[in-house]
Image (spheres, coloured by chain):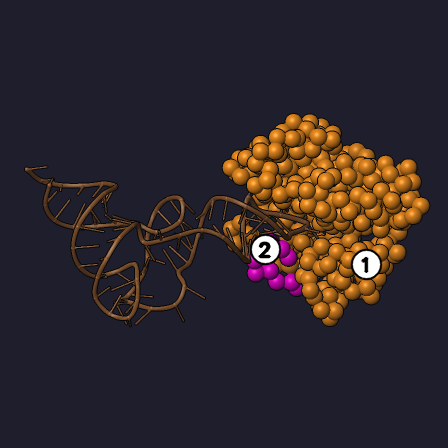
Amino acid sequence: MMFRVERRDPLTSARAGMIHTAHGEIPTPVFMPVGTAGTVKGILHRDLVGEINAHIILGNTYHLYLRPGREVIREAGGLHRFMAWDMPILTDSGGYQVFSLAENRKLTEEGAIFRSHIDGSKHTFTPENVIDIQRIIGGDIIMAFDECPPYPSDHAYALKSMELTHRWLDRCVQHWGETDPLYGHDQLLFPIVQGSVYADLRRLSAEKIASKEMAGNAIGGLSVGEPAEMMYEMIEVVNEILPQDKPRYLMGVGTPANILEGIARGIDMFDCVMPTRNGRNGMLFTREGIINIRNQKWTDNFTPIDATSFSVISRTYTKAYLRHLIISGEMLGAQIASIHNLAFYMSLVTEAREKIIEGNFGKWKDETVKKLSERA
RNA sequence: GUGGUUGUAGCUCAGUCGGUUAGAGCGCCAGAUUGUGGAUCUGGAGGUCGCCGGUUCGAACCCGGUCUUCCACC
C-alpha cells in the first residue's frame, strides 16, 4: 500500500497520512520544496534535511530535459544519483512550463510544440515522450502531461482543454504501463484534474482522473490568478470525487494560508515556488505574518528572523543583517531567506499534521490563517 | 593668468525654435508575485535647472557678472 490515512480531523476534511516510496516515507500533509533544475536554488542537501526537514523535493521535466538533457541524466544513473539526493523526488511533467515559459508554443492533438526559453530551439512534448523523460529522470512520483489553461478561460475553451488533457492522460497511463523504470525502483504516476474554475468541468475531470485508479491524484490549473475563494470551491468540488484513500496533490499552491485552507479541504501534498523565489526577493513568512525584509523599518531590527523556528539559520541571523544581504544582492541573503521560508512552510504542515492527529485542527487552522495573512 | 569646457532629481544624463505642471535610467520608498529564467511587473517620493542681475508677455534655453568642473596653453 502506497498511502495510509492515519487520522481524519473531526470537523474538517483534513487528514494525516503517510506516503511510502522507494526512497522513504513522507508524512502528510507535506510541503515539497521546488528544485526545478535538480537543485532547490541555493540550498545544500544537508540543509534541506537538517534545517528544513524536507521529506521530498520536486524536479522539473521541462528544465531537466533542456539542461543537462536526457543523456547526462541517464549516464549519471538518474536524478537521485546525479544530484546525490537519496530521498523521494517528484517530477512535474512540463505541462505547466510549456504554458508559462516556452515561446511560440503550439498545442496539437499529438502534443505540444514549443521553443526553448534558453536558446529558442524547437521541441515537442507528447504524453509518451514526457513519460519516457520522467523514466530517465527517475522520480518516485511522476506527473501526467497536461495543459494548464490560463485564467480566465471561457467555458468552451476550458472544456476543450480539459478533454485534450484527458486524452493525453489515456496515452500517459498506457505508456507508463508499457514501460519499466530504469533504476530498479517504482515510479508512481499521478494524473491531474483540470477544468479551470467551472464546477461542472471539475467534476467531470475528477471522475475521469479517479477512474484511472492511480496511486495518487493531483489537482492542477489553480492558483493561476483566480480569487482564492474560487480555488477553495474547486478543491471542495473535486475532493468530493477523488478517492479518500489516496493522496491528493494540489499543484503550485501556495501561500501559507492557502495551504492550511487546502489541508482543511482534504489536500495532502503541496508545492510552490513562493517560499524560495519570493524569499530570494525579500518576502519572508512568519507566524506573525508576512515580512518584506527590504522595508526600511527592518534596517536596525537586530532580533532573529524567527526566534521560535526549529531552524538554526532562522534563529541565528537577524532581520537587519538579512535585509542588508538581500538589498546588497548577496548570495547568502537568498540562501538564508530560502532556508527560513522553507523551514517555516515545513513547520506549518508539520504542526497541521500534529493538530490533525490530536483532533484539534479546525480551530487551530482558523486562528493561524488569520495571523498568517497579516503583515508583520 | 589666458582661452575653451561643464554645471538640470541621491547618481549618470536628456531637454526641440524661448512657450502648459522640467523628463529618463539607476538608486531610494512602497506594493504585487502561487506545478522557479536568482526573474518580472505596478505605484510613489524626490528639482530655487550653480548663484546674482538683465532682455522678453514668457527663460533650464538668450545677454552680463560671478562661482564651479574638466582640458589646453602660458
Q: Which residue is mark 2?
A: A102
* Chain of residue at mark 2: A
Residue A85 position by quadrant: top right
Chain shown in brown? B
Task: Please indicate, yes or no, whether residue A35 appears anywhere in the rendered image.
Answer: no
Q: Residue at x 87, y 44 (%)?
A: A363
Residue A362 in the image: state x and y as whole percent.
Answer: 87, 45
Residue occupying image coordinates x 82% and y 66%: A200
Residue B50 is situated, as x and y percent measured from the top left of the image, at: 30, 50
Image depth: mark 1 or mark 2 in front: 1
Rendered shade, chain A: orange
Whether B60 is drawn above or below A178: the answer is below
Q: What is the secondary structure assignment of the residue under circle 2?
A: loop
Which quadrant would residue A158 be assigned to in this image?
bottom right
In the image shown, does A181 or A309 lie closer to the viewer?
Answer: A309
Binning the other alpha carbons within 10 Å of mark 1 as few (below 14), some (14 to 19) or many (20 upward) gives some
Q: Earlier in the sequence, mark 1 or mark 2?
A: 2
According to the picture, the residue beneath numbered tag 1 turns out to be: A233
Horizontal and vertical percent position of residue A344: 72, 37
Check the picture and name the quadrant holding the N terminus of chain A: top right
Badge 1 and badge 2 both on one subunit: yes
**Residue A366 seen:** yes
Measured in 3D between alpha carbons, the distance from the residue under mark 1 to the one under mark 2, in whole angstroms, is: 30 Å
Range of residues picked out in magenta: A99-110
Instruction: Tell me the residue at 77%/59% (across/down).
Output: A230
Give the side of residue B74 with respect to residue A306, left or right: left
Q: Is residue A108 magenta?
A: yes
User: In terms of depth relative to the viewer, which is nearer, A268 or B49?
Assistant: B49
Callout 2 amino acid: Ala
